[in-house]
Amino acid sequence: MKAISISMTVAMVVLLVGCSDTGGPSRKLSMRIDPAQCSISMDDEIILAAKIVSAKKLFAASFDIEFDNDIIDVEDVTVPASCILGSDCTICSFNETEHGISVGIGRIQTPEDDNVSGSGTLVEIHIRAKANGSTTVSFQNVHIIDEAGNPIPRMEKLQTKHATVTVQ
């Protein structure tokens, strides 16, 4: 009877370990620009979404988005109604830089726990085509914090994915 009990315990451990979440690709903290590739005509506008995937304890983020500003120009940065931060968010900054824009977004702090977790859009970037060519649109200097001002879990393993905009 003792041998059966030990065998059942070992079998349960093997089953649980075999079925546990291994932190596969869908569990990795990442940020991306959507769509990943697009083509637009001169003077046309397109909206790119800056998205975060698998965030935990997200309260605020700041990042630069770099691109060739001889080819495209940012007309506006907006917070969509579907923003991952919910209705209690505001753009703290949107500034043009030498190589693109700098964006800051965060939740309004309340006495409650204001952190959010999950995946979704942070901001939408309204791009206008200026000249023929192709440019990479990428994240730089990304800082994501929780309500206490600490880097969110897995921030040190953040993966960023760029987009390519082609103007024809």
Image (cartoon, rainbow, N blue to C red):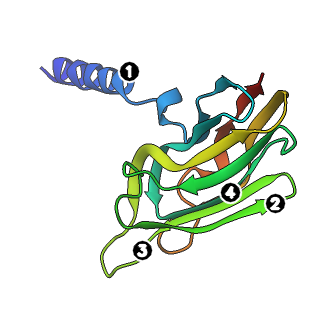
Task: Tell me: residue 92, above or below residue 120.
Answer: below
Secondary structure at numbered mark 1: helix
Q: Position of residue 59 (x, y in %)?
A: 47, 64
Secondary structure at numbered mark 3: loop
Circles 1 and 2, Cβ within 8 Å, touching? The answer is: no
The residue identified by callout 3 is 108
Circles 2 and 3, Cβ within 8 Å, touching? The answer is: no
The residue identified by callout 2 is 97
Q: Please count the marks in the image.
A: 4
Mark 4 is on which residue type?
Phe
The residue identified by callout 4 is 63
Q: Position of residue 87 (x, y in %)?
A: 34, 62
Instruction: Describe residue 128's horizontal placement relative to residue 47 as left or right.
Output: right
Mark 1 is on which residue type?
Gly
Distance CA(mark 4)–CA(mark 1) = 38 Å
Q: Position of residue 31 (x, y in %)?
A: 59, 42
Say whether disc 4 or disc 1 marks the residue closer to the N-terminus: 1
- Please state which of the two labelled residues, at mark 1 or mark 2, is closer to the viewer: 2
Q: Is residue 133 visible?
A: yes
Mark 3 is on which residue type?
Ile
